[in-house]
Image (cartoon, rainbow, N blue to C red):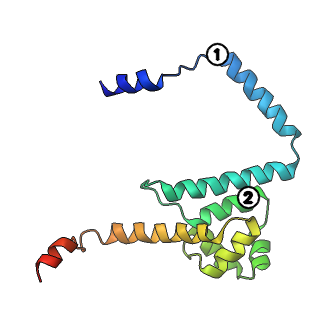
């Protein structure tokens, strides 16, 4: 009953596009993208990664995505060698690889250096780390934690 109400108010949209029309549209877009300068394509992809990072923070999905995975995608977009990037931001190569694999966490210094390198707010990197830490804590300590009820605590006085 509820769905009919919303359909009536909002309306429904059916995709009447044929497979042939979809294929034609894809071909037009592919041709357009081929004409774009490489820098514009890279910038669009960088923005896409930034949007993925923001979406990850908003979602409550079960899967954890390490901040290093986003960095790895950015390095791939710009075809930057990991050893060169480690040297560029002034950290050891092994530490960069640990960041990329999630074995090491972004700190404020690294978040700032990476953020400035790719024009992505350093806070975004730190928020991802914080979200992942909270997820990890919640999963590993679920059974150990007792429910804290502030209202009950105030009555127990």
Q: Nearer the viewer, residue 22 or 94?
A: 22
The answer to whether residue 119 is left or right of residue 144 is right
Which corner quadrant holds the C terminus?
bottom left
Name the quadrant containing residue 54. Answer: bottom right
Which corner quadrant holds the N terminus?
top left
Q: Earlier in the sequence, mark 2 or mark 1?
A: 1
Please report the residue visible at 75 percent of the width from the left and 82 percent of the height from the top: 90
Residue 115: % across, % down: 69, 70
The residue at the far front in this view is: 9
Residue 61: % across, % down: 44, 53
The answer to whether residue 11 is left or right of residue 2 is right
Q: Nearer the viewer, residue 60 or 137?
A: 60
Disc marking residue 132: none
How packed is label 2: few (under 14 Cα within 10 Å), some, or many (20 or more)?
few
Q: Secondary structure at mark 2?
A: helix
Q: Which residue is mark 1?
A: 18
Q: Which residue is mark 2?
A: 76
Please report the residue visible at 66 percent of the width from the left and 78 percent of the height from the top: 110
């Amino acid at each position: 009953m509820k769905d009919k109400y919303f359909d009536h108010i909002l309306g429904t949209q059916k995709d009447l596009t044929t497979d042939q029309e979809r294929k034609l549209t894809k071909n037009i877009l592919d041709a357009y993208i081929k004409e774009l300068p490489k820098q514009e394509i890279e910038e669009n992809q960088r923005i896409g990664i930034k949007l993925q990072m923001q979406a990850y923070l908003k979602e409550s999905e079960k899967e954890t995505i390490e901040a290093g995975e986003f960095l790895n995608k950015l390095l791939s977009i710009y075809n930057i060698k990991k050893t060169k990037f480690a040297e560029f931001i002034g950290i050891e190569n092994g530490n960069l690889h640990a960041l990329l694999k999630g074995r090491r966490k972004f700190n404020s210094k690294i978040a700032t250096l990476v953020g400035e390198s790719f024009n992505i707010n350093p806070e975004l990197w730190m928020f991802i780390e914080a979200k992942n830490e909270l997820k990890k804590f919640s999963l590993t300590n679920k059974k150990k934690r007792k429910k804290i009820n502030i209202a009950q605590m105030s009555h127990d006085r």
